[in-house]
Image: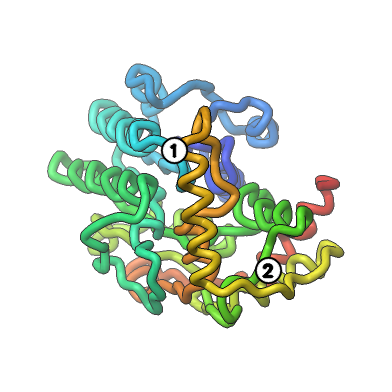
């Protein structure tokens, strides 16, 4: 099978492209940073550089492939709506159109559980529990992108979407690196009582889910799937585990949730009036994410994709720590 992986210069896309090569697939990759995909090219991947905002590039990328694993997109909670719409919705439209015109059989779309975020605690969220309003531009545009993907079903494209929660492992450049940076600067506090439990996904388990999506048929198609390790863990225990592994002091200072939320709101307000609107160091949404319970129901993935997470949270954290130390960061 020949596949295209978009966003392969990023963490998730790059890890899946490598996994697909190890499974014997023929892999074409796309990304903006050639140096980030050199390891894939050495393993036999075909690299095509370029921006998927260009519809003609999307068409070329989809020539002669059976399936597309679409991991490209903008991530974050700060920025203009137009930026997120272009990177998450318009780019996905280009990929969908290219799949249809080039007769690609299947499209796997990497979405996000940020769609669910509303600042409240949630345990065992099911895929249909989408809020009426979205908390940020990222969640809103990821949901719109999903709708673009599923709209292509009526034209014969086989589609599946995935919402993986808190993906980590070797190569994670967003979740723990940010926390490590804050702790090194003495700016990290436990928000609330520190007992909140959250879902995490080993990138290896996500690879298994995506690979199952390439092979699945019948009733498994045309659905969106929550993906996690299926075993929520106390967030701050997990954070301090990573810090101990890296020789950093644990987080012991607490900040009441109402105070943290107020500080974040003030931080956002100040940044909005500063030249260039720089990204705040603290967000209201981030405060809620770090203080509230948040877990997903993965029953649907277990039932239709035979998803059975094998790599534990702690193994995924060990993998991240070993990689981080090897980088000398």
Q: Is residue 189 above or below residue 272?
A: below
Crowding at mark 2 (Cα within 10 Å: few <14, some 14-19, many 20+): some
Residue 254 position, x and y percent, is: 66, 74
Q: Is residue 289 above or below residue 70?
A: below
Give the residue at mark 2. Answer: 239
Q: Total marks drawn? A: 2
Q: In what element is the residue under mark 1?
A: loop
Q: Residue 312: which numbered mark, if any? A: none
Q: Quadrant of the N terminus?
A: top left
Q: Is residue 94 above or below residue 285?
A: above
Residue 238 position, x and y percent, is: 66, 72
Q: Residue at x 61, y 27 (%)?
A: 33
Q: Nearer the viewer, residue 288 or 42?
A: 288
Q: In the rendered structure, which disc, 2 or 1, sits on the residue that comes first in sequence?
A: 1
Instruction: Please indicate whether residue 44 sits to the left or right of residue 149 in the image.
Output: right
Q: Residue at x 64, y 51 (%)?
A: 172
Residue 78 position, x and y percent, is: 46, 43
Q: In what element is the residue under mark 2?
A: helix
Q: Residue at x 73, y 70 (%)?
A: 251
Q: Nearer the viewer, residue 304 or 203?
A: 203
Q: Nearer the viewer, residue 119 or 25?
A: 119
Q: Residue 79: which numbered mark, if any? A: 1
Residue 252 position, x and y percent, is: 73, 75
Q: Residue at x 50, y 37 (%)?
A: 7
Instruction: Please indicate whether residue 38 sits to the left or right of residue 126 in the image.
Output: right
Spatial separation of the CA atoms under disc 2 and disc 1: 27 Å
Q: Residue furthest left?
A: 154
Crowding at mark 1 (Cα within 10 Å: few <14, some 14-19, many 20+): some
Q: Quadrant of residue 184?
A: bottom right
């Amino acid at each position: 099978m020949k596949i295209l992986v978009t966003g392969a210069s990023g963490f998730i896309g790059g890890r899946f492209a490598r996994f697909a090569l190890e499974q014997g697939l023929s892999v074409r990759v796309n990304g903006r940073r050639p140096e980030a995909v050199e390891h894939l090219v050495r393993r036999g991947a075909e690299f095509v550089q370029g921006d998927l905002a260009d519809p003609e590039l999307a068409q070329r990328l989809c020539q002669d492939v059976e399936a597309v694993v679409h991991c490209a997109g903008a991530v974050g909670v700060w920025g203009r709506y137009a930026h997120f719409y272009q990177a998450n919705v318009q780019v996905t439209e280009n990929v969908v159109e290219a799949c249809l015109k080039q007769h690609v059989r299947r499209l796997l779309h990497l979405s996000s559980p940020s769609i669910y975020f509303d600042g409240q605690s949630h345990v065992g969220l099911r895929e249909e529990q989408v809020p009426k309003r979205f908390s940020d531009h990222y969640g809103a545009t990821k949901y719109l992108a999903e709708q673009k993907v599923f709209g292509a079903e009526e034209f014969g494209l086989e589609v599946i979407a995935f919402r993986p929660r808190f993906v980590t492992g070797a190569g994670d450049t967003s979740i723990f690196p940010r926390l490590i940076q804050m702790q090194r600067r003495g700016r990290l506090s436990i928000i609330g009582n520190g007992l909140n439990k959250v879902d995490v996904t080993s990138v290896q388990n996500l690879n298994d889910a995506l690979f199952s999506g390439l092979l699945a048929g019948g009733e498994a198609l045309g659905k969106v799937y929550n993906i996690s390790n299926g075993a929520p863990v106390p967030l701050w225990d997990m954070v301090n585990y990573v810090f101990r592994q890296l020789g950093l002091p644990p987080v012991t200072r607490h900040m009441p949730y109402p105070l943290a939320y107020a500080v974040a709101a003030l931080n956002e307000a100040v940044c909005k009036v500063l030249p260039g609107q720089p990204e705040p160091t603290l967000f209201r949404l981030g405060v809620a994410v770090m203080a509230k319970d948040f877990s997903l129901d993965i029953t649907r993935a277990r039932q239709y994709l035979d998803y059975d997470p094998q790599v534990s949270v702690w193994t995924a954290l060990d993998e991240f720590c070993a990689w981080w130390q090897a980088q000398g960061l």
